[in-house]
Image (cartoon, rainbow, N blue to C red):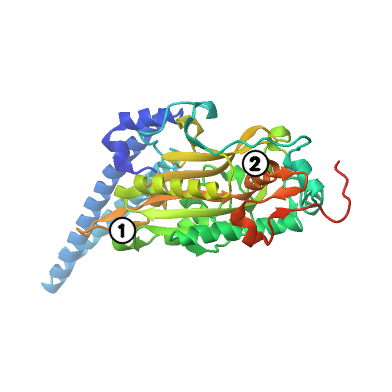
Amino acid sequence: MLQLQVLRQDPKAVKEKLAIKHFADTGLVDEIIALDDERKRLQLESDTTQSKINAASKEIGQLMAKGEKDAAEAKKQEVAALKTALQPIADKLAATEKTQNEKLVLLPNLPSSKVPAGKTPADNIMVKESGTKPTLPAGSVPHWDLIKKYDIVDFETGAKITGSGFPLYKGKGAKLQRALIQYFLDYNTAAGYTEYLPPFMVNEATAYGTGQLPDKEGQMYHMQADNFYMIPTSEVPVTNIYRDEIVKEDSLPIKMTAYSPCFRREAGSFGKDVRGLNRVHQFEKVEIVQLVHPEKSYDVLDEMVSHVEKLLNTLELPFRILRLCGGDMSFASALTYDFEVYSAAQEKWLEVSSVSNFETFQTNRMKIRFKDANGKSQLVHSLNGSSLALPRIVACLLENNQTADGIKLPAVLHSYFGAGSISLPSLNYELY
């Protein structure tokens, strides 16, 4: 949530930045400022009336001590009238604050000055490309055929159990998932991140804190009976660990990592671009989150980008890093870098990670603060990144490393998987 002082300080600049994100309703800025003016007027009127009540109440005690009962009774009537007048002011003040907040949460975060203009993914800027695209042997196939050939992921049974978009990993497919999760967590904790295993359902306040509500209600699975939401990423519960807390300045940065399944309703329509593991309703992901000093957040963003880059290098996958344009950024982000891995069989780039700086947008909602050297409370900055999301990593590992003898795995996974490759199952499964 944007801070009111940012809107009031330079409304024109705020509107210009919102335009970079292609947010159409910039008139909301003026509405919010007008509501804030009304809130301040009502607050002053309320404070003035309450001050009169306090002064008159004090006089009642003094008059009673002097034995001036008639004068004291008159003051009591005055206090009663003031209290009657105060109630509608208080009601109007509460309603104005509620309306102001409802409008304020509709504004997306302001983009950093580093965010390029643009509307679509075609306008994103490529920062770096690394690795060599593999040349596949004759007869190579995409991962949705490989998972049947090697009998490691079963979409049909997953659909029977739950519905489309819920894969059932089995045998070496399940083992590869477990190996990747453990490797990613070990990689992150070795870099100083504390591991958490959070709840996979969150309440409304938690979803609101990280910006999922009110922006992404339709994308989350909602348990109406309890008003809980299945998490779309572990960023949501992990960042909320410090909600409504004042952390010590010398404890910053706070570095957290977590594995979780992720649940997203908007898996998209069926077709080549969303086939197989390219887009599913449930998937596994390891996340990194940092809460940092405001002056250091962009240095930390660069560190987190480098952290993910090195992780992808160990997987021996060709990848590229993109700086997202305003039209392709999330509601809450101030600056985002996407990582895409090249899928040789599909001949396309697949997103596997986003690393973002949210500045104070999330922490203002969650009231995560620290006290500086002068004792003044400040909001920390929050950042997060995928390290990594598994489905498309698995898809690219399978496709890019397929050989006549099996799927070769990168060396870093051998000890985690217990083997250097995925071989054909002993039974003769026909490719269909």
Instruction: Write the residue at 34% across / 44% down.
Output: 3
Q: Is residue 199 left or right of residue 148?
A: left
Q: Amino acid at mark 1?
A: Phe
The residue nearer to you, when weighing 343 against 241, is: 343
Q: Position of residue 384 (x, y in %)?
A: 46, 50
Q: Amino acid at mark 2?
A: Glu
x then y, percent, for residue 397: 66, 46
Q: Residues within 10 Å of mark 2 (few under 14, many from 20)?
A: some
Q: Residues within 10 Å of mark 1 (few under 14, many from 20)?
A: many
Q: Nearer the viewer, residue 276 or 1?
A: 276
Q: Which mark is residue 370?
A: 1
Residue at the spot of label 2: 266
Residue 357, horizontal then vertical, whole percent? 41, 45
Q: What residue is rendered at 59% in x and 43% in y?
A: 317
> Which residue occupies the extreme left position in the image?
66
The C terminus appears in which quarter of the rendering? top right
- Asked which quadrant contains residue 4, the reply is top left
Q: Evaluate whether residue 200 shows in this view.
A: no
Q: CA distance from mark 1 to mark 2?
A: 37 Å
- Looking at the rendered structure, the secondary structure element under dot 1 is strand
Q: Mark 1 or mark 2: which comes first in sequence?
A: 2
